[in-house]
Image: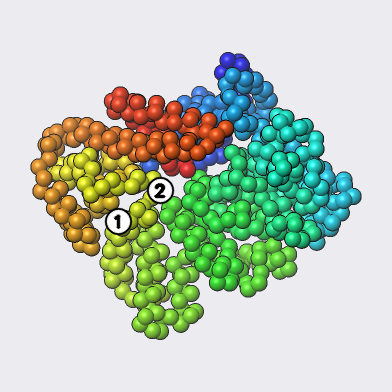
Amino acid sequence: MAGIVSKDVIDRIRSSLDIVDVIGSYIQVKRAGASAKALCPFHKEKTPSFTVNSARQAFHCFGCGVGGDVFKFVMLYENVDFPTALRLMASRAGVVLEFDEGGARSKSDGPAKDELFKANEDAAARFHKELLQSSEAEAARAYLRGRTLDLDAWKEWGIGYAPDGWGFLADKAGGRDSARMKVLEAAGLVLASDKGNLYDRFRGRVMFTIRDELGRAVGFSGRILKPDEKTGGKYVNTPETPVFRKSKILFGLDKGKRDILDQRKVLLVEGQIDCIRCHLGGFPTAVASQGTAITEEHARLLKRYADHVVVVLDADSAGRKAALRTAELLIEEGLAVSLATLPVGQDPDALILQAGPEAFAAVLANACSPMNFLVGLFKERGDLESQEGMLRATRAVLKLATHAQGAVQAEQMLREAAAGLQVGYSALREDLRRAQRLKRRPVSSAGADALAPPATGPHHPVDEVELAILLCSDGHEQGAAFVRRWLPYPLISDPDCRTIIQILAEEEEELIPALDEASDDCKALAAKIANAPCKIGGREEDENGVKAAQDLVVRIWRRHLETQRTGISQRMQTLEGPERQQLLHEMTELLLDMGKLKCGWKAASVILDQYLQRMAEA
């Protein structure tokens, strides 16, 4: 694409955008004249060292050294290549790009994401026009009017109607092998029958257009009007596609992200109509998941825009349990969380319509912390009046507190629990320390992070043991900081080594006392590590110590990537067509990365930094 799009066009796109505004749509920035400062999104820091200069249209972080123009920022933040970043910024700048990607992509790779976005956008326009003009859509219009959604809401939220037929979209797409039909099939808009005939997925439904945080149409949710045994569920959503991942999409985020960024606060509700009603009722920070539980990916997405999440929950038992699970995920991501309980039998849509926005605002004002909410549940059931009930309550509050991502947040949660349970804070704190040690020490592969490869046999990997010995030796604080920066603990394959290295790298407490509840094997390994002579000296040889840490970390990473390579190779044997081509592409990139890890730390650090960014954004 670089050979097709001229430098003049690229410069025009760049000059049409204010880099401060662009970056400000991703992270919170504080303007100071023509420049702005922020906490760097590419490494952890407490004091802002990330600067953005409007005059030079450039950004630079004095902490980690990353810098560049607006395209570079989008590439790093969105984890995309330059062509994708160029497309995103061209759309934002209002510049139309036309690409001839012949030769750049094999036909077997399937349609490009831009084609899927366009197919969804075209379908949304057709569905909306059908809702406005078709006589067949009268039932859909009546349903929406019955939900007190007027014409303005239809237009603003991309609401439409899919006719009750088999070929509204499919009939005009050409034959089975036409390029247009392949795009519709890849976008999940049409699907094949047992005989191979293609037909519309959405039929006889009110259609809600689903957009990602960039405002691009990624899919649909269709609400049935005439339910029967053949029409499927009440709601049918777009299946998983290259542009639609339910675990990464929050309905309404494209509409509310500016208000969310301004307030650093987001309102999390359940359904699409609930979300729309909140916006119409004066609550523009509302978002909703796509008929699925909140995931870690949702939590990471919210953290890009907000510091505080208010979860609106139903008053029934299922709603309470779901809210607490959601709170745990959000707390784990370092977000402040409040839980707002709706009146029995109500949802945000009904409450705002029947009692007014003031009633919903009162529900939000009475939101409480997850810990106070949890303690309140035990009080409500009378569990705190018995010894066994108190034990259950204590275990539950400690489990919730283990998700805290900082000492201050953990202390605040424990003080709330101590006050609610009427027990001593010090006792709870000691129990929490024990629970945290147990949590970070996986007892089986089922409890390990998905990133962690399985342990290979009874012997501890030599490089992991050597890294633990290095961290355990005196005078290697730089090594501990290096490990915290460059080695995610789940990559450490041996559970005992993982536990020991995490304790040493975090520099929380003495090694042996911290393992009082560990297995005998782990304690024995720790004793050997603590008494083993280190090949690297003390503080006067810190440089050599860091070099040794670099070599060991790279070896652990290479073993992790080799495990990924083996997994891709096995999956390729069972796949054909576009999916196999995609895996082949991933395999090629993985082998190139593994080769670069052999070229010294300078080259390896660039590759590892990319993998760490992907993990943070995944």
**2 or 1: mark nearer the eye:** 2
Q: Residues within 10 Å of mark 2 (few under 14, many from 20)?
A: few
> Residue 96 bears which disc, if any?
none
Q: Is residue 2 above or below residue 574?
A: above
Q: Earlier in the sequence, mark 2 or mark 1?
A: 1
Q: Nearer the viewer, residue 439 or 35?
A: 439
Q: Nearer the viewer, residue 184 or 302?
A: 184
Residue indicated by mark 1: 441
Task: Please identify the quadrant where the N terminus is shown.
Answer: top right
Q: Residue 481: where, in percent of width, then height?
A: 27, 41
Q: In the displayed orientation, state which residue is furthest to the bottom.
A: 385
Residue indicated by mark 2: 450
Q: Residue 158: where, in percent of width, then height?
A: 74, 46
**Left or right placement of residue 444 versus residue 586 in this view:** left
Secondary structure of the residue carrying numbered label 2: loop
Q: What residue is drawn where x is 64% and y is 52%?
A: 284
Quarter of the figure with residue 486: top left
Secondary structure of the residue carrying numbered label 1: loop
Q: Residue 328: where, in percent of width, then height?
A: 45, 59
What amino acid is at disc 2? Ala
Is residue 579 at all visible to an observer of this figure?
yes
Q: Is residue 593 above or below residue 505?
A: above
Q: Is residue 314 above or below residue 120?
A: below
Q: Is residue 582 above or below residue 513?
A: above
Q: Nearer the viewer, residue 301 or 422?
A: 301
Q: What residue is drawn where x is 37% and y is 70%?
A: 395
Q: What residue is drawn where x is 46% and y is 82%?
A: 382
Q: In the displayed orientation, state which residue is furthest to the right.
A: 135
Is residue 128 at all visible to an observer of this figure?
no
